[in-house]
Amino acid sequence: MDNRENDKLEKLLWSIALPGFGQLLNGQYIKGIVFIALEFLVNVQGGFNEAIVSSFYGNQAAAIQQIDYGWLMFYPCLYCFAAWDAYKEASGKMPPYAFLPFVFAAYFVTVGLIYSPIVRLMGVLVGPIWLPMLFLIPGIGIGLIIRSLLIKVHGKKIIDNK
């Protein structure tokens, strides 16, 4: 892995750890502080950390009660956008439609959160932490598939417009 790829991965992973950290590493201090403040606001108002602890202890019913869905619905888009932004800014020039896996991840995680109080897998209530995380996988996958299809359909036009 060359230094540029390592740099992109480092900033993406720090942004996944806490939205805003990737921006700070990119030297975008105001944007980084805004993302950290928004993450803190949505996290606290949404009861996210308490729900994470309850979910790790296997108490999904408590996690559902601790979540303020009105606030936490903002989290997937904030989280995925901050990760995308850190990655994009570290990368410089991006390949066509590289944002799509991030966007579809945000969509699917949001849908997972919406259905988290009622979805059971093999009779087990999955809850507001684990179900959205499971929905991340098809979100990224569908984003990659759509990106691939768009590149195939519009590939010549993308190359010609450069």
Image (tube, helix red, strand yellow):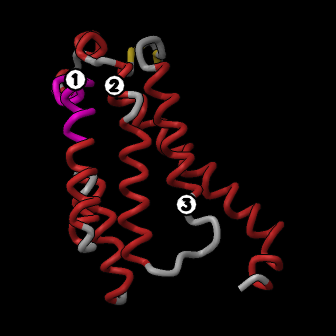
Number of other residues with Cα within 10 Å of mark 2, as a class: few under 14, some 14 to 19, many 20 or more: some
Q: Which residue is mark 1?
A: 47
Q: Secondary structure at mark 3?
A: loop
Q: Secondary structure at mark 2?
A: helix
Q: Quadrant of residue 6?
A: bottom left
**Which residue is labeled 3 in the image?**
99
Q: Are marks 1 and 2 in contact (CB under 8 Å)?
A: yes
User: Which mark lies nearer to you, 2 or 3?
Assistant: 2
Rendered image: mark on residue 152:
none
Q: Quadrant of the C terminus?
A: bottom right
Give the residue displayed 28% in from the left and 65% down from the top: 23
Q: Nearer the viewer, residue 110 or 126?
A: 110
Q: Is residue 29 left or right of residue 108?
A: left
Q: Quadrant of residue 107?
A: top right
Q: Residue furthest front?
A: 30
Q: Name the residue rendered at 16%, 24% in the picture.
A: 50
- Residue 45 position in % (x across, y down): 23, 25
* Marks 3 and 1, the one that precedes in the sequence: 1
What number is the disc on residue 71? Answer: 2
Tell me residue 108's x, y (percent).
Answer: 53, 37
Which residue type carries mark 3?
A: Phe
Amino acid bearing label 2: Trp
Query: Which portion, as a residue range, is magenta?
Result: 39-53
Within 10 Å of disc 3 (Cα), the crowding (few <14, some 14-19, many 20+) is some
Q: CA distance from mark 3 to mark 1?
A: 29 Å
